[in-house]
Image (cartoon, rainbow, N blue to C red):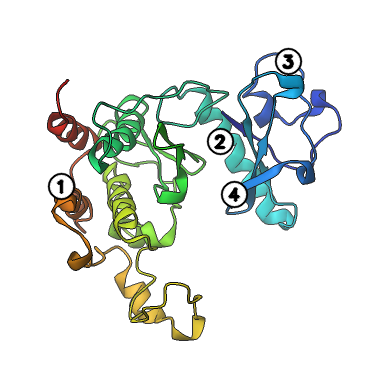
Amino acid sequence: SFLLLHPPLPSSPAQLPSPFISLLPAMSVTIPASPFMQKLGYGTGVNVYLMKRSPRGLSRSPWAVKKINSKCNRGPQNIYQQRLKEEAKILKNLQHPNIVGKLQMKVSEPPSGSGGPEPRGVMLLSASQYLHNDKKLLHGDIKSSNVVIKGDFEAIKICDVGVSLPLDENMTVSNPEACYIGTEPWKPKEALEDDGIITDKADIFPFGLTLWEMMTLSVPHFNLGDNSDNEDESFDEDCFDEEAYYAALGTRPALNMDELDQSYQHMIDLFSVCTSEDPTTRPSAAAIVETLEASLPQE
């Protein structure tokens, strides 16, 4: 379940801001102050907290509370507040087992034989296919930190649709006022160009980089020129090759094939086709789902 908040947090539930109210049924909810909730994570300008809802032994699904960081200046606060409002509107219309939604407690069951990466890829791409084909939306910020996993892959969900963009009938972002935000290391080539045309394929490239993250446990393009064998060594800004980093954005990062055995081959092939610099040669989410589902073991 997913809740959206922005400060200041009112003392009365009746005064909750509209993005929060829009995600709730008609009921009174008291939100604890931030120090009394466990911090789950953070994003650009926002923090996410765990709100437990099982008093006196009652079993209730916990909620995630997203709040604007109180340290943000007024200007950025207004931008993040608007994004939360837009996200709330979008979430109201999304119902998919692999997308974190509005007070959604449904858990998606993994397909049979879900031990390898392909079935998990089906779950991720199924959510993208739903956004692209059913809702005509580009997620706009696919990356590992926007994928949430329950337990031992009991459920996989995509979250954070706050920067999603509308797609037209040609699967293109044609609104001249729409701006692709994304996150820099995961951006496709077309999103880095001033005249780049953004289509549904702009979600496929970062999906490919998310597969790369799974295989390397690294952030795309950040280890350029790093020959250190010390995994515990902290990031050294002085050794960071900024020029090489920016030159590599929008390209396919290399894989160390010596570290990957034959069981990774299908994943490597999928990574390669998804990270083509030419968006027209990348497959659609629907095409990938169809291929992956056909490769799954039959019951």
Above or below, comparing residue 137 to residue 249 in the picture: above
Please state which amino acid type lies under the numbered disc 3: Met
Above or below, comparing residue 285 to residue 30 in the picture: below
Could you tell me residue 179's position as x and y percent?
A: 44, 50
Could you tell me residue 18's position as x and y percent?
A: 69, 28
Of all residues, the one furthest to the bottom in this rendering is 238
Q: Are marks 1 and 3 in contact (CB under 8 Å)?
A: no
Please state which amino acid type lies under the numbered disc 2: Glu
Cα–Cα gap, marks 2 and 4: 21 Å
Question: Which residue is denoted by mark 4 in the rendering?
Answer: 41
Q: Nearer the viewer, mark 2 or mark 1?
A: 1
2 or 4: tag closer to the N-terminus: 4
Report helix, strand or loop for mark 4: strand
Side of 16 where 159 appears, left or right:
left
Residue under the point 33% across and 37% down: 124
1 or 3: tag closer to the N-terminus: 3
Of all residues, the one furthest to the top in this rendering is 26
Report helix, strand or loop for mark 3: loop
3 or 4: tag closer to the N-terminus: 3
Cα–Cα gap, marks 2 and 1: 37 Å
Please state which amino acid type lies under the numbered disc 4: Gly
Question: Which residue is denoted by mark 1 in the rendering?
Answer: 266
Could you tell me residue 174's position as x and y percent?
A: 34, 41
Report helix, strand or loop for mark 2: helix
Q: Are marks 2 and 4 in contact (CB under 8 Å)?
A: no
Question: Which residue is denoted by mark 3 in the rendering?
Answer: 27
Task: Return the mark for residue 86.
Answer: 2
